[in-house]
Amino acid sequence: MISMKNEAIIASWNKIGPSALAQERMFSAIMARNRSLHENKDKDRYISKAKKALIPAAACFALLIAVTAILGSGRLDLRRGTGLRDAGHEGDIDGTLPGDLPEGMDPIVASLAVFPEGESLADVSDAVLIGLSEEEAYRVEQLGRRLPSVIPDGYRFRHAGLYKTTMKNGAVYYLLSASYSFGDTAFDDSQEDVPDTLDFSVSVLSFKPETKAETYSFDELPDDLSGKGFLYVVYGDTYVGVDVGDLTHEEIMSVLNSVN
Amino acid sequence: MSDSLLRTDKEIAEIYSRHVKTVYRVCFAYMKDPADAEDAVQETFFKLIRSGPAFDGEEHEKAWLIRTASNVCKNVLRHWWRRRESIEDCPTLPGSDEPEIDDVFQAVMALPDKYKAVVYLHYYEGFSGAEIAGILKKPQSTIRNHLHEARAILKERLGDDFDEK
């Protein structure tokens, strides 16, 4: 094939470009990210040294937690659901909306809204989703520390989002969601083929959701969670929703055990 | 975190300076508005920072950025939660002057997403089909087909404005 430029295309595309202010804004964000990565690298090195000393104690603690969970649990039938729908979310995960919306309600706002049990979609003023990197997700105030620190072998972070809903009375609710995929190509966006299916996801809420999904305290988990779809585990006043996907029970427990 | 190349601020600034316009142009063709293009540019450079690939030279660096920008945009567009659907719905960021979009660029933006990076690389950068196949990591036959189909669409929409010289 002959290499061939096109003058019309070149002239046309040359008119497209970021303004000086936009360039400055992007540059600042990019440099901030680079500096942040350098700082985290330093922190990681420090933590790695500390972790080596704590491995034996951590292993004993994890074993204790696992035994407690298994002994204190009973087998329960879980219903499949989605984190968003079960967090007071009227829309389905694919954006379709059941039934009629409240008058004047933007369907997109409705599809993104998350709110506690007892609140109503009609009282939602606005809802947005903010895309987050892995570093940003784990740093979200109050919620980020509840994301799992252990991911099963072969799985990698894929993407995360912070759902922010503002009610008409001024109350604001957040849901942090992170998804993880199996294999490298699933999360490496520099590759062409990114599968549409997610392998498992974790949602963190600081409020009690209106939900049909089964909800457990950490000490009362069933003895087999594999294939159970979506469930909530309560850690103090935080609800952690897990769509377990294809994870085995042991993998699910490793994820749940690593939630702070 | 894998052992990747951690670049200094100076190195990142140099790469940014060399390629920001190219990356922005590619992103704009996909995203169709300044605010989303800006987000996609940032995400592309964030990926560069995070994954820290080593490059053989500036052309390799540019090729990696174009491929990554293209994938970043396609992934964003694939997400069901994408809120803004048209340029009219976009919040105006300071300094985000609306670019001058002529008929030719309108036609490029209207192409199916899978053709946009190929069109940019061939008609703007002047890469051959084989080179584009290497950059985008796709078979040459696929690139040939994409170029053939994109060319047919552009010729139909633009007529004489799309004379290949």
Image: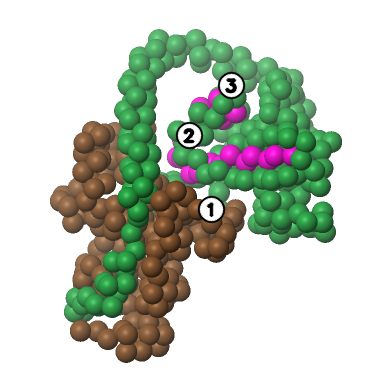
Chain colours: A green, B brown
Q: Chain of mark 3?
A: A
Residues drawn in magenta: A143-167
Q: In terms of image quadrants, where is residue A147?
A: top right
| B101 w.r.t. A134: above or below | below
Report which residue position mark 1 lands on: B91
Query: What amino acid is labelled 2 in the image?
Result: Glu
Same chain letter for marks 3 and 2: yes
Q: Which mark's residue is nearer the viewer, 3 or 2?
A: 2
Residue appearing at x 53%, y 41% in the figure = A160
Residue appearing at x 29%, y 56% in the figure = B21
Q: Residues within 10 Å of mark 2 (few under 14, many from 20)?
A: some
| A96 w.r.t. A126: above or below | below
Residue B128 at x, y = what percent?
Answer: 21, 72
Can residue B44 be seen in this snapshot?
no
Report which residue position mark 3 lands on: A260
Q: Earlier in the sequence, mark 3 or mark 2?
A: 2
Can residue A8 be seen in this snapshot?
yes
Q: In terms of image quadrants, where is residue B140?
A: bottom left
Q: Chain of mark 2?
A: A
Nearest the camera: A73 or B30? B30
Q: Which mark's residue is nearer the viewer, 1 or 3?
A: 1
What mark, if any, has residue A135 been given in the picture? Answer: none
Secondary structure state at the residue bearing disc 3: loop
Q: Residues within 10 Å of mark 3 (few under 14, many from 20)?
A: few
- In the drawing, does residue A135 fall left or right of residue A170? left
Disc 1/disc 2 C-alpha distance (Å)? 23 Å
Query: What amino acid is labelled 1 in the image?
Result: Pro
Query: What amino acid is labelled 3 in the image?
Result: Asn
Q: Which mark's residue is nearer the viewer, 1 or 2?
A: 1
